[in-house]
Image (cartoon, helix red, strand yellow):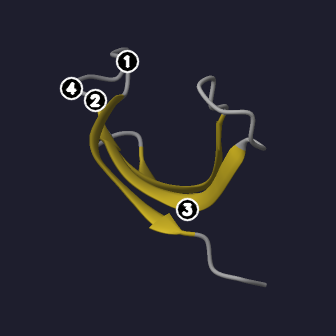
Amino acid sequence: MFLSLDPAAGAAKVQVDVKRVYEHTAVEAKPQTDEMTALMTLSRPGPRSPWFIDTAEYRPKAPK
């Protein structure tokens, strides 16, 4: 979800849900799953330039 987007200025803030799955190979255990929310700020130097991640902050996902 875009929290803010200003393509002319080359700035954006996004929030996405992330699910990480760790599969341990040394022990026979279930995969460990972490659900988080990522808040990222993005920028680009020009209108046709690629977007770059300036900051990324991960927080545990809030329970529903």
Determine the CA span between mark 4 and mark 1: 8 Å
Disc 2: which residue: 44
Outermost residue, front side: 27
* First reached walking from the N terminus: tag 1 or tag 2: 2
CB contact under 8 Å: marks 1 and 2: yes
Measured Cα–Cα span from mark 1 to mark 2: 6 Å
Q: At 67% from the left edge and 31% from the top edge, which residue is drawn?
A: 23
Count residues near mark 2 (Cα–Cα under 10 Å), then give few for <14, some for 14-19, many for 20+. some
Mark-to-mark CA distance, 2 and 3: 23 Å
Going from N to C along the chain, the mark reached first, 4 or 1, is 4
Alpha-carbon span between mark 1 and mark 3: 23 Å
Q: Mark 1 highlights which residue? A: 50
Give the mark toward the camera: 3 or 4.
3
Q: Are marks 4 and 2 in contact (CB under 8 Å)?
A: yes
**Residues marked 3 and 4 touching at CB (< 8 Å):** no
Q: Residue furthest bottom?
A: 64
